[in-house]
């Protein structure tokens, strides 16, 4: 498994407070210097939550992180503590068939009340990881006077969780790339033991999953 790992050979449940949505699109162009962001659909996020606003130009560093200062009662307009540093453009393109295509940056919720955090400095590129896999053992049964083969498959159900400082920069020669979440040899979907990652945020890491 290696160091700084949550090894899941049984079951793992991590569930934060559910949100109606965890990311949406910008509804109208948000210019640099302004503190308001109009959304394309209502959200139930809270004052103090941190959000990410993705770039709409060719510079990835123009993606911005902000804290919510207030939000309108209809959940459609966010006011940020600090002003936007860059303009985030929204285009509505009308196609020949009359369909309108909404082209816009995303606004995503980073904050969740359940968090998995690595305390290693981000510059180390060596955060935590969650490994979900299977295992098999042979155990001696004195009654049957024989070895019994036992196979067990792990599972993880994760929702509305914030992962901070995940992934490990380690050069390997196999399929394990030291991701923040590594699902290994779990086989087909099993309704009785489902594995899923839903509505989570991956915040400040190396390699998510």
Image (cartoon, rainbow, N blue to C red):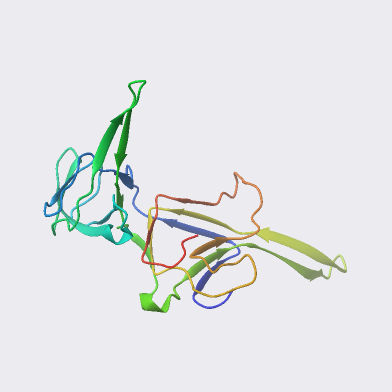
Q: Nearer the viewer, residue 139 or 30?
A: 30
Q: Nearer the viewer, residue 13 or 198?
A: 198
Quick one: quadrant of the N terminus? Answer: bottom right
Residue 41 makes an appearance in the image: no
The image quadrant that residue 136 belongs to is bottom right
- Residue at image x 30%, y 32%? 93
Spot occupied by residue 24 in the image (x, y as percentages of width and height):
31, 43
Q: In this rendering, would 59 be left or right of 32? A: right
Q: Considering only vertical position in the picture, is 2 above or below 149?
A: below
Q: In this rendering, would 2 be left or right of 32? A: right
The image quadrant that residue 172 belongs to is bottom right
- Residue at image x 11%, y 51%? 34
- Residue at image x 45%, y 76%? 126
Spot occupied by residue 51 in the image (x, y as percentages of width and height):
26, 55
Q: In this rendering, would 197 be left or right of 154? A: left
Label count reads: 0
Outermost residue on the top side: it is 97
Q: Considering only vertical position in the picture, is 27 above or below 66?
A: above
Spot occupied by residue 196 in the image (x, y as percentages of width and height):
51, 51
Residue 196 makes an appearance in the image: yes
Q: Nearer the viewer, residue 110 or 194?
A: 110
- Residue at image x 40%, y 54%? 200
Q: Considering only vertical position in the picture, is 137 above or below 32?
A: below
The image quadrant that residue 153 belongs to is bottom right
Spot occupied by residue 96 in the image (x, y as percentages of width and height):
35, 22
Outermost residue on the right side: it is 145
């Amino acid at each position: 498994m290696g160091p700084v790992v949550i090894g899941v050979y049984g079951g793992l449940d991590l569930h934060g407070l559910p949100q109606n949505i965890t990311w949406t699109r910008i509804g109208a162009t948000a210019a640099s210097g302004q503190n308001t962001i109009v959304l394309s659909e209502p959200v139930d996020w809270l004052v103090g939550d941190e959000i990410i606003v993705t770039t709409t130009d060719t510079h990835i560093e123009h993606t911005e992180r902000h804290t919510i200062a207030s939000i309108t009662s209809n959940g459609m307009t966010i006011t940020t503590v600090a002003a936007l540093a860059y303009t985030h453009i929204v285009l509505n393109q009308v196609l020949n068939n009359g369909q309108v295509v909404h082209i816009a940056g995303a606004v995503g919720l980073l904050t969740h009340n359940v968090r998995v955090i690595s305390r290693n400095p981000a510059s180390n590129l060596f955060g935590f990881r969650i490994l979900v896999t299977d295992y098999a053992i042979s155990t001696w049964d004195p009654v049957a006077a024989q070895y019994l083969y036992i196979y067990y498959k792990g599972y993880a159900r994760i929702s509305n969780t914030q992962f901070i400082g995940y992934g490990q920069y380690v050069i390997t020669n196999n399929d394990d790339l030291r991701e923040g979440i590594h699902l290994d040899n779990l086989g087909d979907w099993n309704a009785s033991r489902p594995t899923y990652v839903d509505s989570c945020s991956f915040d400040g890491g190396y390699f998510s999953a």
